[in-house]
Amino acid sequence: MTHEPAASLQLPRATLASMVTERIRDSIVTGVLEPGSQLSEVELAHSFGVSRGPVREAIQRLVQEGLLRSEPHRGVFVPVLTDADVVDVYLARAALESAALRRLIATPHSPSSYEILDQHVVGMESAAARGEWEAVGGFDLEFHAALVASTGSPRLQRMFATLISESKLCLAALTGGETRHDLVTEHRAICDAIRDRDTERALAALEKHYDDAVVSLTSSTPRSSAVEGVGTDKEIT
């Protein structure tokens, strides 16, 4: 008689799938699973101590997010992003966030939303002053999430959630030494333009921010050095 692993008996399958999804997502964006790595349902299920069902569901979710790529008759891989992929991700983000920015400035209650954005920029400024660039990156993502959330649009937020996952995959190509120190001033420029309700200045600052991001990412460590289909011996813990 076949028995389910103990962990799968203790938690609902939906909860297990969410936990496995988060663990795999974190391993991808932190580089534990390198671009080109092939994933095995059996090995992941054994590593997590669960059945293959939650792992399969987690993989499906991450394929939808763009953090994994399913290739017929080959398997599932961590994508190897090209420069064209990076440009496309940030083109989509710029379009989405430009719409959010216009909506925010046009909304009568935008001052409260501005205060939330300002708090994230202040956090960035403080973290940068301490040289804590990982924290700066965290405030960066929170700033953009808050900008989109300010629209109150569930659809824009769903689209943003997918794009931010792919953005993290892009950012994983950068090393700590390649951190952009102009992130803080760029976010301050966007935030101040929103405070002044200057739509054109805010849009220009946002466009510059993403243009600079694309330049930094496409000139970082070449992604082509990773070969699709090559497995990894790194273990997800």
Image (spheres, helix red, strand yellow):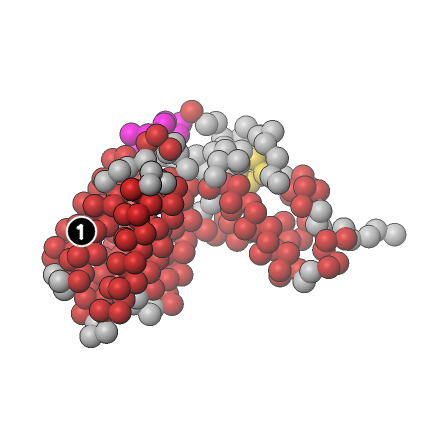
Q: In which quarter of the image is the C terminus?
A: top right
Structural crowding at the residue carrying mark 1, measured as other residues with C-alpha within 10 Å and reported as few (<14), some (14–19) or many (≥20): some
Q: Which residue is drawn at 72% across and 55% down?
A: 8
Q: In which image quadrant can residue 119 be found? A: bottom left
Q: Which residue is drawn at 53% across and 30% down?
A: 229
Q: How many labels does the image show?
A: 1
Q: Quick one: which residue is furthest to the top in this view?
A: 225
At which x and y percent is residue 235? Answer: 61, 35
At which x and y percent is residue 103? Answer: 22, 67
Residue type highlighted by circle 1: Ala
Residue 221, magenta (yes or no): yes
At which x and y percent is residue 205? Answer: 17, 50
At which x and y percent is residue 91? Answer: 27, 47
Residue 47 in view of the camera: yes
122 lies left or right of 173: left
Which region is colored magenta?
Answer: 217-224
Residue 61, magenta (yes or no): no
- Which residue in the structure is indicated by mark 1? 189
Q: Is residue 148 above or below residue 237?
A: below
